Image (cartoon, rainbow, N blue to C red):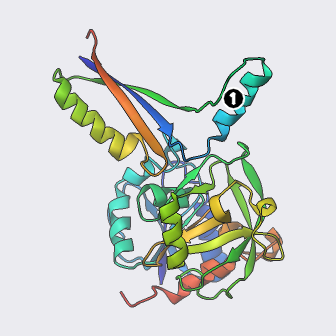
Amino acid sequence: MLEAEIHVTLKKSVLDPQGETVRSALQSLGFQGVEDCRIGKFMVVRLSGADPTQARAQVEEMCRKLLANPVIEEYVFQIREVGG
Amino acid sequence: MKVGILVFPGTWSHQDFAHVFQDVLGLSWGYVWHKGTSLAGYDALILPGGFAHGDYLRVGAIARFSPIMEAVVRFARDGGPVLGSCNGFQILCEAGLLPGALLRNRSLQYRCQWVHVRTEHCDTPFTRTARPGQVLKIPISHGDGRYYAPPEILARLRSNGQVVFRYCTPAGAAADEANPNGSLEHIAGVCSEGRNVVGLMPHPERASEPLLGSEDGRVLLEAIRGGALQPR
């Protein structure tokens, strides 16, 4: 069985007020050198197939069609083998 | 003239729209469940506010794949008038019928309050009876209303005159203090290139009777009587 780990984040050009709030909270906790913080989504999708190339194409299409909105978001993912 | 009011699981403003059409404007209307596939007999469509499909993943992201949306896309491509308010606006953006996207309010707070919007263009099926520049007092009620479009799309919206409403002061000045959610260029509503699809974050159905504190929302809903911009 294959598992896709997908990260969806706001594009750099899009203001992320949540990330900004967390960044300033980290700063007020005394963490030095926090330049920036961005908040995104993490999704894990399990796939029954065994062919990583096919899985890659499938997950790519999932991201384009539903999991990310290309107007505001970008995505990265990796696929790995997991025990059934 | 019959108006179709779309209902998704989690829609909450459909009854308010129905009340305005039925009791205030005397227009015929019908609910269209999201699992339907036909819009036969309807001359205009409303996508009301709410939290369709729980707004899981992103606002409007799941609703845009509801079975009825294929018919909505065809209706819009044929020039039929379509109005999305609040969650309806978010769904129309996700469906690609309107440009841009709606993001979490800049304040990170849900905002339920009166706002003023300035009518920028009157050549849509929903603003045809408004005066150019007319300021409308209409409430908002949303957590994700910050309008965003990339710079090249924003430029196109400006040159095509697709920004239909901007947040403004009661006197009509677009200004930061009148912008409740951090929308780019104070954008409160936009229309499609064909001008027949309009989306806005405010709730016109909640401002259509004097008892509610404003009748300004009626301007948009009354205009529906005029039907499509061009004969379909």
Reading the image, the residue beneath label 1 is A22
When the figure is inspected, residue B63 is found, relative to residue B211, above or below; the finding is: above
On-image quarter of the C terminus of chain B: bottom left
When the figure is inspected, residue B72 is found, relative to residue B90, above or below; the finding is: below
Q: Seen from this angle, which residue lies furthest front?
A: A33
Q: Nearer the viewer, residue B115 or B157?
A: B157
Residue B114 rendering spot, x and y as whole percentages: 79, 63
When the figure is inspected, residue B188 is found, relative to residue B209, above or below; the finding is: above
Please report, as a chain letter, where disc 1 is located: A
Residue B189 rendering spot, x and y as whole percentages: 60, 68
Residue B72 placement: quadrant: bottom left
**Residue at the spot 41% in from the left edge and 36% down from the top edge:** A75
Q: Nearer the viewer, residue A2 or B150?
A: B150
**Residue at the spot 43% in from the left edge and 27% down from the top edge:** A43
Looking at the rendered structure, the secondary structure element under dot 1 is: helix
Residue A20 rendering spot, x and y as whole percentages: 68, 35
Residue B38 placement: quadrant: bottom left
Q: Nearer the viewer, residue B101 or B226?
A: B101
How many neighbours does mark 1 have within 10 angstroms: few (below 14), some (14-19), or many (20 or more)?
some
Side of B118 relative to B72 (left or right)? right
Residue B86 placement: quadrant: bottom right
Side of B82 relative to A38 (left or right)? left
Side of A83 relative to B48 (left or right)? left
When the figure is inspected, residue B120 is found, relative to residue B92, above or below; the finding is: below
Q: Seen from this angle, which residue lies furthest top?
A: A83
Side of B30 relative to A57 (left or right)? right
Q: Amino acid at mark 1?
A: Val
Q: How many marks?
A: 1
Q: Can residue B83 be seen in the rendering of this structure? A: no
